[in-house]
Image (cartoon, rainbow, N blue to C red):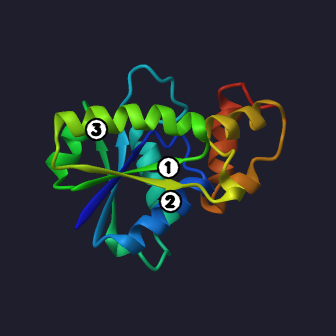
Amino acid sequence: MKACYPGTFDPITLGHLDVIERAAKMFEELDVLIMKNPRKKCTFTEEERKEMIEECLKDKPYKDKVKVVIGSGLTVDYAGKLGAGVIIRGIRAVSDYEYELQQATANQTLDPNIETLFMIAQPKYSFLSSSTVKEIAYGGGDIAPFLPAEITEKVREALAKQGTLLL
């Protein structure tokens, strides 16, 4: 069976990579789906995010099972176009669950053939999001413990160019 893991991934974090690895063990194929979201102001373009994710996956033992794609529109519709029978969603806290439950219920109504699988974050990643990483960087903190080593410098440079990173 094929699954997809949608998100903005701006940037991808160690928490995201953990979900990808765990999902790759469960499914024959996994599409990491970078969804275009015009309501979000992203630091990186969809193509840059795709390249960063592929860079982070290139040496992983499960890399042949994972493909990174860019999509738009409703996630459930795009999952169907990809042939995915499952949408993977990470849950860090109760607030995530409440939001994700609403989305999963709507998706189930739109396409009852696509299931949603909630994956609980490991405790060490339960606070971690792309927004948290950016906030730490904006305040002058070290973002290296939260990002894959392959992209940490690229993220620092991008935030510095925006003039939002305190050096």
User: Relative to residue 108, is residue 13 drawn left or right?
Assistant: right
The residue pinned by badge 2 equals 19
Pointer 3: what residue? 75
Marks 3 and 1, how far apart at CA: 15 Å
Does residue 3 lie above or below 73 as drawn? below
Q: Amino acid at mark 3?
A: Thr
Hey, which residue is sitting farthest bottom in the picture? 61
Residue contact at pointers 1 and 2, CB within 8 angstroms: yes
Q: Quadrant of the N terminus?
A: bottom left
Find residue 77 and report its horizontal and vertical position in percent. 19, 38
Tell me which residue sits at (41%, 76%) in the image: 62
Give residue 139's position: percent from left, percent from top. 82, 31
Q: Which residue is mark 1?
A: 90
Report helix, strand or loop for mark 1: strand
Side (left or right) of 17 relative to 108:
right
Residue at x 75% of width, y 54% of height: 144
Foreground disc of the pair 3, 1: 1
Give the Cα separation between the discs numbered 1 and 2. Answer: 7 Å
